[in-house]
Amino acid sequence: MVPTFPPVSFRRHARTAAATLLIGLLAHTAASAAAGDGAYPIDDPLAATVVGTPKAYRASLPTDLPRESRTLAPLVERPVPSPLAYAVPLEYGLIAQDEPAPLMFILAGTGAGAKSAKSDVIARALYTEGYHVVTLPSPTSVGFMLGAATHPVPGRMNNDVADIYRFMQAVRDDLPERVRITGFSLTGYSLGGLQAAFVDQRDRQEQVFGFERVLLINPAVDLYASVRRMDRLFDTGLEQGIAGLPAFLEQALGRFRQIYAGEDPIEFNEDFLYQAYLATETREQDIAAIIGLAFRLWLANMNFAADLLSNSGVIVPVAREPGTFTSLDTYLVRSFGMSFADYIDELLLPYYNKDGRQLTRDALIREGRLARIQPYLKRAGHMGVITSADEIILDRGEVDFLRRTFGERATIFPHGGHMGNLAHRDVIGAIREFFRP
């Protein structure tokens, strides 16, 4: 048995599931030591990833900033299928200084748009350091796939980076005259951190921006290996796959009822989750399920959009585009059942190998590894990295790779999981210090 959903967009499905997942976040395996010295307080990397940074440990960042959401005409003209119309138009975010200043580009993580909460945290920190800030969507977001992707099947690093680079130039040319630019810098988090390294290498060859500083925040080192780790969290946490989802959500809701018996409205934020984290105990498998399920929801969204835009027929039969009122249940189940390895084998490689081309799986995977540009990274004195020693998308060897490659330009915090410590005062301090003149 699988869950059913109303005939609305995949994004609506993802939002509904994410709201339920926030209840599921109340699960945790053990109480953390209360970090009395102000260090990041959660020593379990999975819990850190989902709980984030409690208020008492967060850096002080401004909230009242001159944010703008700006739109670009599509960089690639293609029909917009009805189920993907929610992702139009192509957007980027801008926070501009009143005076001449360097411009910071922020590349978002997997599936995120220009309004990503993590991009916003970084943007607020760097605006206070005197930067104009532009936030960009990820090539794995549906909006980017529709309006900016030369090939609407993301995951091939060289092509995704080329599209990001072109997008950045279009944004630079679109900025209003009042935004007076004195130079350029670049950062990105998660997948965007990995991509930032390749964007900078490309720019050193083409010399369009001449980035003064580049910072990789919690980057993947090997894209395929990191995504497979997320797939394994899903497989470990939900042993029955999508068939086990109703029981898992029911269990999570039951846990919520046990914890909360008050009548006051609940604000699902990092502080609420942290208090629940301290108060509850459950299996580590459940936290793995939460992270894996959130990742699989994003992947299902990308699978569906890539299949529909490329007319591949893997999920949606060829020449049978869903209409506005078409139920997406069948397509959701198909998309949700595809791991990232399935996506590569059934969508990505066939797309690039049509018409007799010969892109191999190994060649595709090599494109997404920092190791292939390690000599450049070692001598790129303007580039640094910030991550956590217990980063869940890396193994110990990959953390060591970052240490060896970047040396003193690597800042590695002991705890934080994947982006859980981003808002912590020490992490924000390190980001600010790196970009400070």
Image (cartoon, helix red, strand yellow):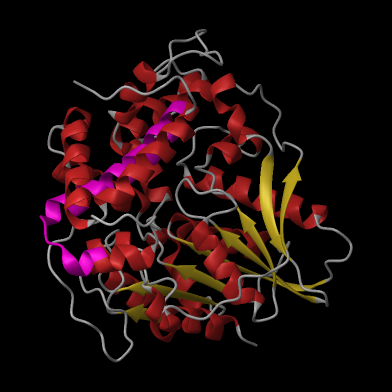
Image location of residue 234, percent across then percent down: 22, 43
**Going 55% across and 82% down the picture, which residue do you hit?**
432
**Side (left or right) of 67 relative to 138:** right
Coordinates of residue 133 in the picture (x, y in percent): 67, 66
**Magenta stretch containing residue 290, yes or no?**
yes
Stretch in magenta: 276-304
Q: Quadrant of residue 296?
A: top left
Name the main secondary structure of what is drawn in magenta. Answer: helix
In the figure, 286 relative to 250: above or below? below
- Image point (33%, 64%), residue name: 272
Nearest the viewer among 1 and 256 is: 256
Can residue 363 be seen here? The reply is no
**In this orientation, which residue lies closer to the viewer: 69 or 55?**
55
Is residue 384 toward the left or the right of residue 262 in the image? right
Location of residue 359 with respect to 57 vertically, above or below: above
Q: Report whether residue 82 is seen.
A: yes
Residue drawn where x is 33% and y is 51% of the image = 22
Q: Nearer the viewer, residue 309 or 123?
A: 123
